Amino acid sequence: HLREAFEVLSAYGIPVARFVVVRSAEAAEGAARGLGFPVAMKISHGGLVHKTEARGVALNIRSTDEAFHTYHGLTHVLAEQLKVEMAGRAVVIQEMVSGRELILGMVRDPNVGPLLMFGLGGVWVETIRDVAFRPVPLTDLDARELMRAIRGYPVLAGVRGQKPVAFDRIEEAITRLSQLVADFPCIEEIDINPFFASEVPEDCKAADARFRLRW
C-alpha cells in the first residue's frame, strides 16, 4: 500500500510528496483543498502494481468537485479490476510534484545480494531501461558514481540551458535507501518511481513507491 510505503521512506528521511489518505468522496474534497490545488489522486492498494496502466491514478485535479467525482471513479476501477467492495476504500490525495523523473529502488541478486538501483524513471523505465546498480551498502562516493553510471546523466546535469538537479539531495536519498535495505533483510524489492529530481532541493520527492517483502 502506498501509505505504508511512504511512511517507511519518511521514517528514513527519504522525502515524499505530501499526502492524505481518505475513505470517502467528501473527505477527498477536504483533503484536496487542504493540500492545495492541483493534486494527484491514487488508489492505495497493493494489488495494483502498475497504477497508471490500471487507471488507478488521476493527475492535475483542480477543484473540490473534481476531487469528489475522481474518488468515485478510482474506487470504481478498484472494484472492477480487483473485485473488491467500493465503499470506504482508501484513496491517496497527494500534492503535485514535478521535475526530472527518476527511479530509485532495490533488487536482490541471488549471488551478490541486495543491489541498489538508480536510473531515469517514469515512462523511460519501460522504453530505454537506463538504470545502473551498485551493491549495498553505499557510501556517498558510491552514490555519486551510481548517478554518473547512467547514459542519461547529462539530462540531470542540465542540457540546453537547464539547471542541474540538486544532486546532494538525491545522493542523500540513495544512501538513506541503502541504509533502509541493510536494516531490513526481509525486503525483497523496492520500486520508487517516479522520484522527482528538481533543481530546488526541497522539491526532490518520491511520488510513488512499492515494497515487496519475502516471507
Image (tube, rainbow, N blue to C red):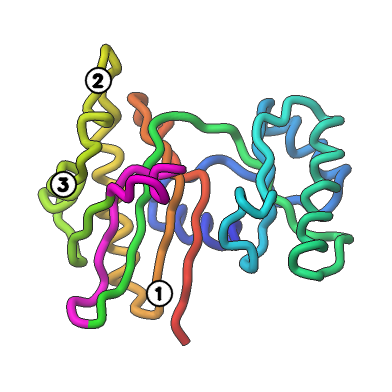
Residue farthest front in this picture: 127
Q: Nearer the viewer, residue 125 or 34?
A: 125
Residue 128 among those drawn in magenta: yes
Residue type at the position of mark 3: Ala
Q: Position of residue 27 (x, y in %)?
A: 83, 44
Label 1 belongs to which residue? 187
Q: Position of residue 118 (x, y in %)?
A: 28, 51
Q: Earlier in the sequence, mark 1 or mark 3?
A: 3
Q: Name the residue: 60% across, 57% down.
A: 3
Label 2 belongs to which residue? 159
How many numbered discs sit on the rendered protein? 3
Residue type at the position of mark 2: Val
Q: Which of the numbered marks, if any, corresponds to residue 149?
A: 3
The secondary structure type at the circle numbered 1 is strand
Q: Name the residue: 80% across, 36% down.
A: 67
The secondary structure type at the circle numbered 2 is loop
Say whether residue 83 is left or right of residue 212: right
The secondary structure type at the circle numbered 3 is loop
Q: Which residues are magenta?
A: 111-130
Residue type at the position of mark 1: Ile
Q: Name the residue: 86% across, 45% down.
A: 25
Q: Earlier in the sequence, mark 2 or mark 3?
A: 3
Q: Nearer the viewer, residue 80 or 195?
A: 80
Residue 19, quarter of picture:
top right
Q: Earlier in the sequence, mark 2 or mark 1?
A: 2
Depth check, mark 2 against mark 1: the one in front is 2
Above or below for 131 versus 37: below
